[in-house]
Image (spheres, rainbow, N blue to C red):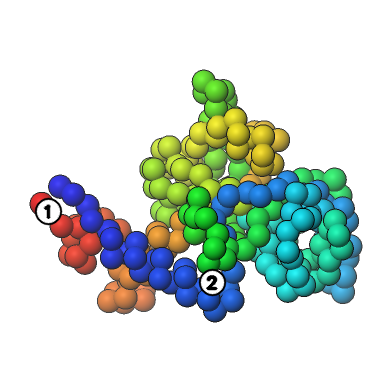
Amino acid sequence: MCARLELIFGYTILRSIHKVNSEQSMFTGIIQAIGIIDGKQACEGDYRFTISLAELADQTIAIGDSIAVSGVCLTVVSLSNTAFCADVSLETLSRTTLGRLKPGSTVNLELALTPQTRMGGHFVSGHVDGVGEIVSRVADARSERFVINTPKNITRYIAEKGSICIEGVSLTVNAVHGDEFDVNIIPHTLSVTSIGQLQSGDQVNLEVDLLARYLERLMEADQPQSKAPQMTEQRLKQAGFIQDH
């Protein structure tokens, strides 16, 4: 049997490209710099973060641009030669790990995708789906194997050998066991992202693969809203996304 999901994949790409063109920023999950929280200032009920640009300081960045900060899409509201400021709402603070950051904390940085950007990871929206917790971190040859516990409402979107974004980093899922999944992180990724500093008990931003969400959305189109679709092999065949050869 050969599972053919080209239609879904093409649909996802077209929707993602549309988002880029309609000024809804997208990212790739390939980290460009590790920034540092220089300041966190209360501002009329929420917060304004000042974040060092690090290696991004020589990039062309303007007020209004989007930057993914540990997987969270933020808008540049002010800018200097070495840092930028972004306003973070209470909603974002409560649904991501940003609320736990303090001056001196490190964050992963990525500029928004452009038509010229090399696609090295997978499409990432910068909208965090949930906060996971690192259950364990153990050496696995030259890499490190992380086991992460996920919120129950996003577990169904995580699949073996599928993509997931952790703290803004595009990674491949090794295996899924109930509400936990594991990933292997190579030495290069450990050294050029903040993931290298994480330990058991730390919380991380998670964004599931857009492909999984689009697939569910397409399959539920003909279902009563009260019924949650079950993405079984039989349903995929009925929908025409799997064909026997």
Q: Pick whichever, 12 or 99, lies toward us.
A: 12
Q: CA distance from mark 1 to mark 2?
A: 35 Å
Residue with the mark numbered 2: 20
Q: Position of residue 182 (x, y in %)?
A: 49, 37
Left or right, residue 49 beside residue 235:
right
In the image: residue 103, left or right of residue 10: right
Q: Is residue 241 above or below residue 184?
A: below
For the point 57% across and 66% down, the residue is 114
**Percent coordinates x, y for residue 152 in the rendering:** 49, 52
Number of numbered callouts drawn: 2
Residue 88 against residue 105 in the figure, above or below: below
Residue 227 shows in this picture: no
Disc 2, SS: helix
Q: Amino acid at mark 1?
A: Asp
Disc ID at residue 244: 1
SS for callout 1: loop
x and y percentages locating residue 211 in the rendered image: 40, 60
Point out the frontmost of discs 1 and 2.
2
Q: Residue at x 55, y 32 (%)?
A: 186
230 displayed left or right of 104: left
